[in-house]
């Protein structure tokens, strides 16, 4: 059946929902296709929180596992075995037409499920498995473990019926580095709900958060870790402090304990406000306090979904010059040399000094978000891919 409503079994091997980029993609894709009349069941870990309209099924509770942050864990293999059996149980009553599996672990589970259920598998790839575990320091480059995970990644990539990626760069890597046929890979970048994320009252937002009114505020929203560039961002702050630049940073995300201590040790605490974890439904209210936004992400294997939210809120964006960032921002962003905190600080100072130019840049970013990056448009493309996949199997 390809003309009527489709039933989608969505696999999310993660503590969904935990207010971070990967989970936003899962939520918004599910919401978009459901709003177009499709049926969906999401199967995920025991922790996280339900998100209203998305029917969610969870594995049994594992009391000793409560990790909400991103990154690999040696606990995940048995969690994913539980997810496989839970998904199989849900599928027997739901009778899905296809499987939509997020992340490599989800696609690995999906390979077994598709053989048991005789339905096709769509793999939603948000970066390289091997690249991610190296970024997180889980394995060393060149080690035996890296070769094991690389072989596993190749098996997953080649075992999926079709793959969507969160960037064109990731799609290119799948075809050139992993040997996946071109016709099986489609870039489907993240998007943004431009009604929920929109420009707000900056002065009021600053007052409500207790931010200084006499200096510009630079915002960051996302996970706080090394591959998101937070260590580099602290170096940027040290450079700006040494120059006497009047600026305040609003760092929104988790885990923040390590970086609070680092900021205090480096004498930067007075120019930073840490919020901790931000509820996704309130993210736009917090972003409204920003004069500009930064994403010093250094991972070259993952998407950068926070940029879509920045853009929709009319925030001028400063990023490192990477293919993923160029694809999202185009000419509506400012680019620093990759991995160079000195150049990042220079570009940030230029943006702070040119208020008119920065506001114009933010306006262009908002226009680009509305015209090119809405989740409604992404959902329509995803549904088309679903129907093509279902038709092929029929």
Image (spheres, helix red, strand yellow):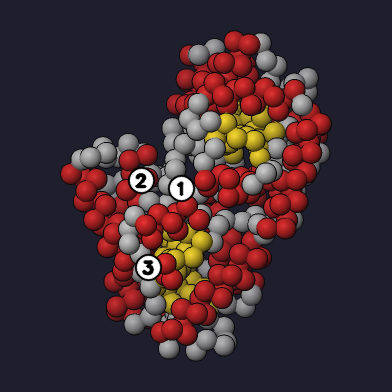
Q: Residue at x 48, y 30 (%)?
A: 339
Q: Helix, strand, or loop for circle 1?
A: loop
Residue 90 visible to the viewer: no
Closer-to-camera residue (62/31): 31
The CA distance from mark 1 to mark 2 is 9 Å
Q: Quadrant where the C terminus lies?
A: bottom left
Callout 2 crowding tier (Cα within 10 Å): few <14, some 14–19, many ≥20: some
Q: Is residue 82 above or below residue 314?
A: below
Residue farthest left in this picture: 144
Quadrant of the rendered image containing residue 205: top right
Q: Which residue is mark 1?
A: 302
- Residue 157 falls left or right of residue 314: left
Where does the image place residue 253, in percent across and percent down from the top left? Answer: 55, 37
Q: Is residue 55 above or below residue 147?
A: below
Q: Residue at x 32, y 58 (%)?
A: 178
Element type where label 3 sits in the image: loop
Q: Which residue is disc 3 drawn over? A: 181
Q: Which image quadrant is residue 206 in?
A: top right
The percent position of residue 29, horizontal first and vertical second, equals 56, 64
Instruction: Determine which residue is flagged by label 2.
Output: 131
What is the quadrant of residue 172 in the picture? bottom left
Q: CA gap, disc 1 to disc 3?
A: 21 Å
């Amino acid at each position: 059946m390809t003309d009527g409503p489709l039933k989608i079994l969505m696999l999310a091997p993660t503590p969904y929902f935990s207010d971070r980029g990967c989970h936003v993609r899962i939520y918004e894709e599910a919401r978009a296709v459901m709003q177009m009349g499709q049926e969906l069941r999401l199967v995920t870990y025991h922790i996280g929180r339900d998100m209203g309209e998305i029917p969610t099924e969870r594995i049994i509770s594992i009391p000793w596992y409560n990790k909400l942050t991103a990154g690999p864990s040696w606990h995940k293999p048995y969690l994913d075995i539980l997810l496989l059996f839970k998904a199989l149980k849900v599928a027997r009553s739901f009778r899905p037409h296809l499987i939509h599996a997020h992340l490599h672990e989800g696609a690995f589970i999906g390979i077994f499920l598709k053989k048991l259920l005789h339905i096709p598998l769509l793999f939603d790839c948000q970066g390289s498995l091997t690249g991610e575990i190296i970024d997180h320091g889980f394995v060393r480059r060149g080690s035996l473990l890296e070769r094991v995970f690389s072989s596993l990644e190749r098996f997953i990539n080649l075992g999926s019926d079709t793959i969507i990626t969160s960037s064109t760069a990731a799609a290119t890597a799948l075809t050139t580095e992993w040997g996946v046929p071109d016709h099986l890979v489609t870039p489907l970048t993240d998007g943004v709900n431009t009604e929920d994320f929109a420009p707000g009252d900056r002065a009021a937002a600053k007052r409500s958060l207790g931010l200084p009114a006499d200096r510009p505020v630079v915002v960051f929203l996302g996970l706080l870790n090394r591959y998101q560039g937070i260590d580099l961002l602290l170096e940027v702050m040290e450079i700006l402090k040494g120059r006497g630049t009047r600026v305040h940073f609003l760092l929104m995300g988790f885990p923040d304990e390590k970086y609070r201590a680092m900021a205090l040790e480096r004498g930067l605490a007075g120019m930073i406000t840490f919020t901790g974890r931000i509820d996704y439904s309130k993210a736009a209210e917090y972003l409204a306090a920003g004069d500009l936004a930064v994403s010093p992400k250094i991972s070259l294997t993952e998407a950068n979904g926070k940029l879509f939210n920045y853009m929709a809120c009319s925030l001028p964006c400063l990023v490192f010059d990477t293919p993923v960032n160029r694809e999202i921002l185009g000419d509506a962003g400012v680019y620093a040399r990759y991995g160079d905190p000195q150049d990042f600080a220079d570009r940030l100072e230029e943006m702070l000094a040119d208020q008119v130019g920065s506001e114009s840049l933010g306006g262009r970013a908002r226009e680009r978000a509305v015209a090119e990056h809405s989740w409604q448009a992404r959902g329509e493309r995803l549904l088309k891919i679903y129907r093509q996949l279902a038709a092929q199997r029929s």
